[in-house]
């Protein structure tokens, strides 16, 4: 039976550490984008609050105040929808990059594992055909299960994205309809 050498173990460990640091870097890039988005939103909100306060202080009657309030509601809804879209885009992009890295690492790990299994099967003693068939069957079942999970996650992600896009489009249409009214 063939086992991994010390060099192979060290190489696998090094590869796993590199993958971990790569994933950590991608996660931090996503956090940086989120912080940048939130800083932009906070800065814009402060400027708008100053303008709104000035406008509110210059109001001469209740009717003018109501018109000011009505004029503020629609842009606030649009900004909330835009913020949600940006937030979703950041999360989706970060998630996609992490998923790609995990899939690549998983595929590489599966290939290495299958190589070890194949090597072990080739060196199996005579009379162990049933055990070899069982190992091969278990490996095939595990691979099929993993692929099924990957497909289900992708379908769920695609459905969530489609729902988000649909909600965004509906919100945009509603905002435009209110603006036109």
Image (tube, grey):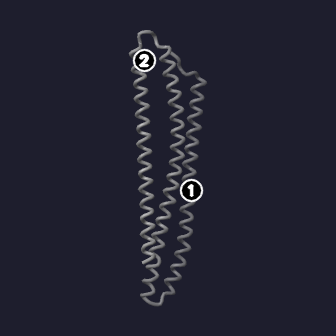
What residue appears at the point 45 percent right and 53 percent down from the top-left corner?
Answer: 161
Residue 58 x/y as whole percent: 51, 87
Of 32 and 174, nearer the camera is 174
Of 32 and 78, nearer the camera is 78
Residue 96 x/y as whole percent: 51, 47
Q: Of discs 2 and 1, which sits in the foreground?
A: 2
**Label 1 neighbour load within 10 Å: few <14, some 14-19, many 20+:** some
Which secondary structure lies at badge 2?
Answer: helix
148 in relation to 164, above or below:
above
In space, the residues marked 2 and 1 are separated at their CA atoms by 50 Å
**Which quadrant is the C terminus positioned in?**
bottom left
Say which mark, if any, is on residue 132.
Answer: 2
Count numbered badges in the picture.
2
Instruction: Name the residue beneath numbered marker 1.
Output: 33
Residue 35 x/y as whole percent: 55, 58
What residue appears at the point 51 percent right and 79 percent down from the top-left corner?
Answer: 52
Residue sticking out furthest to the top: 126
Say which mark, if any, is on residue 103.
Answer: none
Residue sticking out furthest to the bottom: 60
**Label 2 neighbour load within 10 Å: few <14, some 14-19, many 20+:** some
Circle 2/circle 1 CB separation < 8 Å: no
125 in relation to 142, above or below:
above
78 in relation to 118, above or below:
below
What residue appears at the point 42 percent right and 46 percent down from the top-left corner?
Answer: 155
What residue appears at the point 54 percent right and 57 percent down from the top-left corner?
Answer: 34
- Nearer-N-terminus badge (2/1): 1
In the image: residue 2, left or right of residue 175: right
Which secondary structure lies at badge 1?
Answer: helix
Residue 5 x/y as whole percent: 58, 21
106 in relation to 128, above or below:
below
């Amino acid at each position: 039976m063939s086992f991994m050498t010390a060099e192979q173990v060290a190489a696998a460990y090094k590869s796993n550490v590199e993958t971990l640091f790569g994933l950590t870097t991608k996660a931090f890039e996503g956090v940086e984008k989120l912080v940048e988005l939130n800083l932009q939103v906070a800065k814009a909100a402060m400027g708008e609050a100053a303008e709104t306060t000035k406008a509110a202080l210059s109001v001469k009657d209740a009717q003018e105040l109501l018109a000011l309030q009505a004029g503020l509601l629609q842009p606030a809804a649009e900004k909330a929808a835009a913020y949600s879209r940006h937030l979703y885009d950041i999360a989706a992009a970060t998630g996609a990059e992490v998923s790609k890295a995990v899939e690549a690492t998983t595929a590489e790990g599966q290939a290495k594992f299958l190589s070890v299994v194949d090597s072990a099967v080739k060196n199996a003693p005579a009379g162990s055909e049933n055990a070899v068939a069982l190992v091969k069957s278990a490996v095939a079942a595990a691979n099929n299960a993993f692929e099924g999970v990957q497909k289900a996650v992708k379908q769920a992600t695609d459905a969530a994205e489609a729902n988000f896009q649909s909600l965004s489009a509906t919100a945009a249409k509603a905002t435009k309809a209110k603006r036109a009214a």
